[in-house]
Image (tube, rainbow, N blue to C red):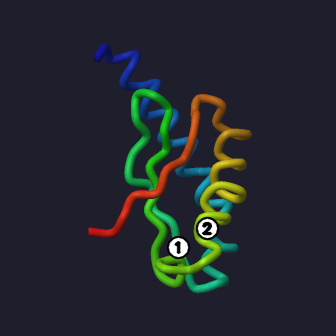
Amino acid sequence: MSQTASQGASSVTDRVQKVLALIRPAIQADGGDVELVEVTAEGVARIRLLGACIGCPSASVTLHVGIERNLRHHVPEITRVEAVPHP
């Protein structure tokens, strides 16, 4: 990967982190949290839900309606969001 490509990738990651920082207080208010695991070369944001989000019946809605919609709107390079299971 060229330096320009890696700078672009980190720029996308930085922008994803900024959007997550804006969303995080609402998730934390319900006892959960969110962690960015990685942004793939294909534009997939891999997210791990934490705290009360683990096993929550609404976690899928939070991931796709809340997080994915915001990320795709603010970071057009993101093509989708997928949950990363806990180890």
Q: Quadrant of residue 40?
A: top left
In this rendering, the answer to whether 8 lies above or below 61 is above
Q: Viewed as shown, does residue 83 lie left or right of 15?
A: left
Q: Secondary structure at mark 1?
A: strand
Type of the residue with mark 1:
Asp
In this rendering, the answer to whether 61 lies above or below 28 is above
Type of the residue with mark 2:
Arg
x, y (%) of residue 87? Answer: 26, 68
Residue labelled with disc 1? 33
| Dot placed on the residue nearer the N-terminal end, 1 or 2 | 2
Who's the residue at 67% across and 60% down the image? 22
x, y (%) of residue 19? Answer: 63, 51
* Quarter in which the N terminus is drawn: top left
Residue 55 is tagged as none
- Neighbour tally class for label 1: few under 14, some 14-19, many 20 plus, Cα within 10 Å: many
Q: Viewed as shown, does residue 32 lie left or right of 58?
A: left
Residue reaching furthest to the front: 57
Residue labelled with disc 2? 24
Who's the residue at 64% across and 74% down the image? 58
Who's the residue at 66% across and 83% down the image? 29
Q: Quadrant of residue 77?
A: top right
The CA span between labels 1 and 2 is 6 Å
- Neighbour tally class for label 2: few under 14, some 14-19, many 20 plus, Cα within 10 Å: some
Label 1 close to label 2 by CB (< 8 Å): yes
x, y (%) of residue 84? Answer: 39, 58
x, y (%) of residue 44? Answer: 48, 38
In this rendering, the answer to whether 17 lies above or below 41 is below
How many labels were placed on the picture?
2
Q: Secondary structure at mark 2?
A: helix
